[in-house]
Amino acid sequence: MYLINRENVEWLISRSGLPFDYDMVVIDELSSFKSHQAKRFKILMKVRPGVKRIVGLSGTPASNGLMDLWAEFRILDMGKRLGRFIGSYRNTYFEPDKRNAQVVFSYKPKPGAEEAIYRQISDITISMKGTDHLKLPELVMNEIPIRMSDEETLHYKTMKDEMVLSLHGREIDAVNAAALSGKLLQMANGAVYDEKHDAIHLHDRKLDALEDLIEAANGKPVLIAYWYKHDLNRILKRFPAERLDSSDSIRRWNLGEIPLAVIHPASAGHGLNLQAGGSTLVWFSLTWSLELYQQTNARLWRQGQKETVVIHHIISKDTIDEQVMKALRYKDKTQSALIDAVKANLNKGGPA
């Protein structure tokens, strides 16, 4: 048995000089191969015909919607169920959603497409929810609303409407919709980067809400999820928190030696066991990524956790924060439907 991380798959196949003569391949976190344009997907497909058996494991198979499934199942069955080409899959099951003239930005499933996709993949797909087969603690999801002042709201609205803003004598602009989304998320958090990548302060309302949550924890350890570096800097400036970014810090967190910790979802997403160190998670910054969101929550809400897990979301009202939460709920609904469609009923001895 050989183990390798996904970042080195390209090296193993193309540059190591070692023969890729494995009769079976197991891909943990199969969703990391969801992009058909990624180098790791393309290089693995080159050797896929020589693999007799392949298994993919994932807790988030369709984190951004059913379009993610094509590349994952292309690896598993060489295109037998969902087609050999992404264009054919797209045309069969999807129709344009958001577009500008001939440019299509996103697709939505055609009527009946979800059920058709589930039927196609059901014979090689099995799903087992941890909540069904493992004894997990209670989970409490909580939203903490905060409101910006009239002046702060005006700055936010100006940025949203005009994609440019002068704040404290410094220029902030967004070159496209994606950049604007990032700027608005930053402003909802309380600071925003200018064109020189310097952080400009807007408000401390999320920090105030975070302070209340830390006090309400009554000394119990609190884990804080952040996204932008200026979020991290402002949190560390205000609170005696420690970053969980090394094996030593993670060890001390699980020993209960760190009462207040901060972590980035991209580094917390997969593989970390943090349930021994605490049961309270605060989302200071939100992320569009359902995969990172769910995987970060699962660092605390998992087997071995002995207390009720409380996950707080600090939400700036009337901002993009509300849209992110709505998007996460919608994506979760789509993914939950997929998982339920291929759910295993172990008591009956096979897939439902």
Image: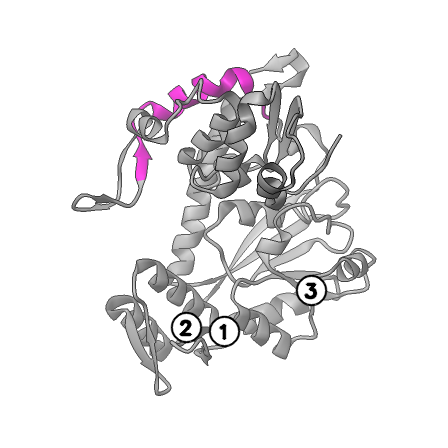
Give the residues in magenta. Answer: 107-127
Q: Is residue 345 left or right of residue 156?
A: right
325 is within the stretch colored magenta = no
Q: Is residue 233 left or right of residue 71?
A: right
Q: Amino acid at mark 1?
A: Arg
The residue to which callout 1 is attached is 205
110 is within the stretch colored magenta = yes
Q: Which mark is residue 241?
A: none
Query: In the structure shown, which secondary structural element does the residue marked by tag 1 occupy?
Result: helix
Q: Please identify the quarter of the rendering in which residue 53 is found.
A: top right
Q: Residue 299: x, y in percent?
A: 67, 48
Query: In the structure shown, which secondary structural element does the residue marked by tag 2 occupy?
Result: loop
Q: Which of labels 3 and 1 is toward the front? A: 3
Q: Residue at x 65, y 41 (%)?
A: 16
Q: Which of labels 2 and 3 is toward the front? A: 3
Q: Amino acid at mark 2?
A: Met
Label whose residue precedes the other's in the sequence (3 or 1): 1
Q: Is residue 171 visible?
A: yes
Q: CA distance from mark 2 to mark 3?
A: 26 Å
Q: Is residue 318 visible?
A: no
The residue to which callout 3 is attached is 261
Contact, CB < 8 Å: mark 1 with mark 2?
yes
Judge by depth and name the residue closer to the eye, 348 or 253.
253
Q: Residue at x 47, y 73 (%)?
A: 190
For mark 1, does the 10 Å Cα neighbourhood hold few (<14), some (14 to 19), or many (20 or more) residues?
some
Which quadrant would the C terminus be assigned to in this image?
top right
Q: Residue 10: x, y in percent?
A: 57, 41
The residue to which callout 2 is attached is 148
